[in-house]
Amino acid sequence: MYKHLFGPVPSRRLGMSLGIDLIPKKVCSLNCVYCEVGKTTNLTIERLEYVKYDSVIAELDKFMSDDPKIDYITFSGSGEPTLNSKIGAVLQFIKKNYPTIKTAILTNGTLLYDKKLRKELLDADVVLPSLDAASEAMFKKIDRPSKKLNIKTYIQGLVALRKEYKGEIWLEIFLLKGYNDSKKELQLLKEAILKIKPDSVQLNTLDRPGTKQGLIPLTKNEMQAIIDFWELPNVEIIASPEERSSIESYSGDIETAILETIARRPCTLDDLHNFLGIHINEINKYLGKLEASGKIETVALDRGVFYELKHK
């Protein structure tokens, strides 16, 4: 059982992707209303060695000794990976010892104003930052950042990364009805995109319960209307949960284990993690597909969001 590695997880964007989690749950610089992992328990921008370098490298070497078939090693997890002060060292180790494996950084992008951090990430093949708003008011409403962050510095960090980084940047924008889907907010986002110059813009919306109740996702037609409004190249809608089961790395065994567990009693995400010993990010991929296919449903209770078999 691995403590800091998870997957490979089913991903249309990254194929067979081995995840590395460098941060304890839920240490982050944001407390986004839509976060499927849960509420941030340590809202911070302080970079520390939250997970020790040596323990990550030991797990990597053990996993890679079996010569697994993977396309990417991805820095992601249950918090903001760039908060770990050793992320650059882990990335360099991978590039030196496993040069044929591509690397990806999934980040909210808030710390990219830090020149030292940007330098640490230069060896990655792909950086996937987020940007959900381009106004200060909406940034605070949807992402609920650390008080030490502001939207101007956030966007400047993304612009600086584009100037220094030679790899690909895939910018993800998470859309919610009544939040960042107004013409005003969308125009500001378009202006920010033009400054950042990402290789790709990927639109996402809610398919898992967030940390705030009552959130409404956008439909594919509504997201397509945003693409038409922007008139920008290389903007796409991220694949829906239903399509994940067609990915080679999708495991029917994990899906069955989840269904059998919640058949006994409704479970939260943390319950499933504790029962099955599977990383919460990996579980979330399957929950999204199971809910979209009508096999499970969610119930909000005092202890959190519970998953149960859908009643017919």
Image (tube, grey):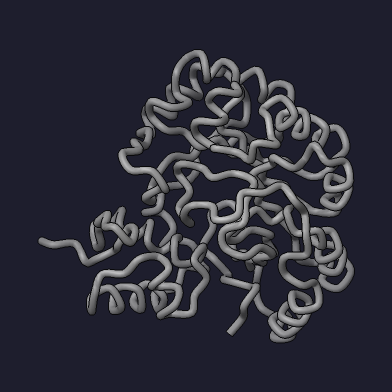
Q: Quadrant of the N terminus?
A: bottom right
- Is 12 above or below relative to 61? above
The residue that appears at 36% across and 78% down in the rendered structure is: 257
Query: Would you say 23 lies left or right of 178 here?
Result: right
The residue that appears at 89% across and 46% down in the rendered structure is: 116
Hey, which quadrant is residue 196 in on the image? top right
Q: Nearer the viewer, residue 194 or 115?
A: 115
Query: Would you say 137 lies left or right of 262 here?
Result: right
- Is 178 above or below relative to 32? above
Q: Quadrant of the C terminus?
A: bottom left
Query: Would you say 252 lies left or right of 293 here?
Result: right
The residue that appears at 32% across and 58% down in the rendered structure is: 305
The residue that appears at 77% across and 54% down in the rendered structure is: 47
Hey, which quadrant is residue 173 in on the image? top right
- Is 52 above or below relative to 123? below
| Residue 27, horizontal then vertical, whole percent | 62, 56
| Residue 269, horizontal then vertical, whole percent | 40, 65
Q: Nearer the viewer, residue 312 or 216?
A: 216
| Residue 179, horizontal then vertical, whole percent | 44, 27
Q: Nearer the viewer, residue 60 or 28?
A: 28
